Image (cartoon, rainbow, N blue to C red):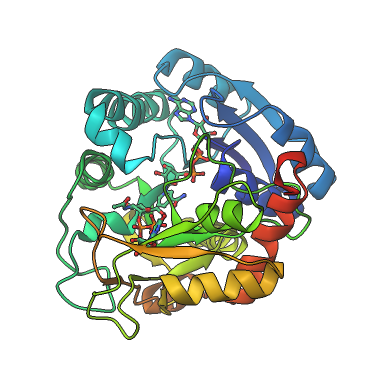
Amino acid sequence: MNVLLTGGMGYIGSHVAVVLLQAGHHVVLYDNLCNSEIETLARIEQIAGVRPTFIQADIRSAKALTDALKHHAIETVLHFAGLKAVGESAINPVDYYANNVGGTVSLLEAMRETGIRSLVFSGSATVYGEPQYLPLDEAHPLCATNPYGRTKLHIEEMLRDLSASDPLWRIVCLRYFNPVGAHESGLIGEKPVGTPNNLMPYIARVAAGELKELSVFGNDYPTPDGTGVRDYIHVMDLAEGHMAALGWLTGHPGCHAINLGTGQGYSVLEMVKAFASASERDVPYQIAPRRAGDVAACYANPEKALKELGWQAQRGLPDMCASTWKFVSSRPEGRG
Ligand code: NAD
Ligand code: UD1
C-alpha cells in the first residue's frame, strides 16, 4: 500500500515507518523537521533496508500536501504531525491550535481534493481527562484539561463530523497511553530537545549522568507506593498497533476510537527501579511536590484493540527500559 506519514520523522512516526517498510509498504514521510532530524532518514533505511521517500514540508500547506498525495498515489494517511508539549501548549496555545488543528484541517482539505478517505490519527489518552473509573475504555467521557489535550479532542470531534457527513471515510483515532522505549537497534528513539518533561526520557538522562537526579512528583497519591501510575507502552508495540489498524481500516468505514495501551500500570518508583536494573546505573531521586494537572493513575482497557485489531502489546517493562538505555547510551552525549 502507498502510505503517507505526516510527522513521520518524529519519535513514533519513525518506528511506524520501520514496521511498514519491513512489511513491504511504500512509505512517504512528510515532515517539516520542527522536532526531528534529517539523520533519522538514514537510520530508518539502515534498519529497514529500504529508504522511504522524504518530503520536507509543512502540513499547513494544503498545496504541498495535495501534490505529495497525488504524486505518490497515496491510499492511506497516518497523521502523526503535531506539537505535543503540555506545558508549552499553555504558554503558546495559538501555536498549538494553528499547528495541530489548523494543520489537520489543511490535511483533510488535501485528502478531499485527492479523493483519499482513509486516515489513521495519533490520538491520546489525554482526551479522557481526569479518570472517572479505571481502566479507561473508549466509552469513558471525554474532557480536555490543557490546550494540547483540547487540540486532540477538537481533532477527534472534527473527524467524527467528517465521517458523519460522508460514509466513504474510514478513520481510526488511536488513543496512545504513554509511549516509551526505542527500536532494538538503538538507532532511533525519543530525543527531546532541552530538559525532558516526561518521565522515561528524564530517568534515562539521570542514568546517563547528564541530569543530577529525578524529582518524583508526589508520593502521597492513593496508589500502592504513593507515586503516580501510568500505562507505559513500548513504541514498537505501538508501531505494530498501527500496522494492525491499517489492515483493519480497509473493511471498516466510519470513525473509530481505539486505545493503544497495555492495561498494566507502573508507578514512578517502579519505573526508577526497572531502569536502574536495565542500565546498571544509579537513578538518584528526591520526592518533590505534585505536578499541577497530574492524575494519580491512568491505564487502559485494551480489549477493543484485541477484539477489533487482533493486536495486543507484547513487550514488557525490562524491554522498554533496555531499549531506551541502548538508544540514549549510544549517543555521544549519553555515555555519561
Ligand atoms: P514528535 O515530536 O517526535 O513527532 C512529531 C513530528 O511531527 C516531528 O517530526 C515534527 O517535526 C513533525 N511536525 C510537527 N508539526 C509539523 C507540521 N506543521 N508540519 C509537518 N511536520 C510537523 O512526536 P511523537 O512523540 O512522535 O508524537 C507523534 C504524535 O503522537 C503527535 O501527534 C502526538 O501528539 C501524539 N502522541 C504522542 C504521545 C507521546 O507521548 N509521544 C502520546 C500521545 C499522543
Ligand atoms: C504527559 C502529559 C500527557 C501526554 C503524555 C505523553 C502532562 C500533565 N500530561 O502525561 O498529556 O499525553 O505526557 O506521554 O504533562 N513524573 C515525575 N517526574 C518527572 C516527570 C514525570 O515524577 O520528572 C511522573 C508524573 O508525575 C507522572 C508520571 O511520572 O506520574 C508520568 O509522567 P509523564 O511521563 O510526564 O506522562 P503523563 O503525565 O502521563
Give coordinates of residue 293: x percent, y percent. 21, 54
Q: Quadrant of the N terminus?
A: top right
| Outermost bottom residue | 224
Residue at (43%, 31%) from the top-left corner? 115
Residue 331 in picture, x, y percent from top left: 75, 43
Q: Is residue 251 visible?
A: no
Along the horizontal axis of the image, is 75 left or right of 176? Answer: right
- How many numbered dots are placed on residues in this image? 0
Q: Is residue 172 left or right of residue 146?
A: right
Name the quadrant containing residue 229: bottom left
Point 42% across, 70% down: residue: 268
The residue shown at (85%, 45%) is 49
233 sits to left or right of 314: left
Q: Residue at x 45, y 74 (%)?
A: 269
In front here: 290 or 112? 290
The one of 23 and 225 positioned closer to us in this rendering: 225
State the image quarter where residue 143 is shown: bottom left
Residue 100 falls in which quadrant of the image? top left
Please say whether residue 199 is visible from this viewpoint.
Answer: yes
- Indicate whether 232 appears above or below 161: below
Depth order, front residue of 186/270: 270
Closest to the observer: 143 or 20? 143
Q: Is residue 288 left or right of residue 286?
A: left
Report x, y in % for residue 206.
58, 55
When the figure is inspected, residue 227 is found, relative to residue 25, above or below; the finding is below
Q: Position of residue 58 (x, y in %)?
A: 48, 20
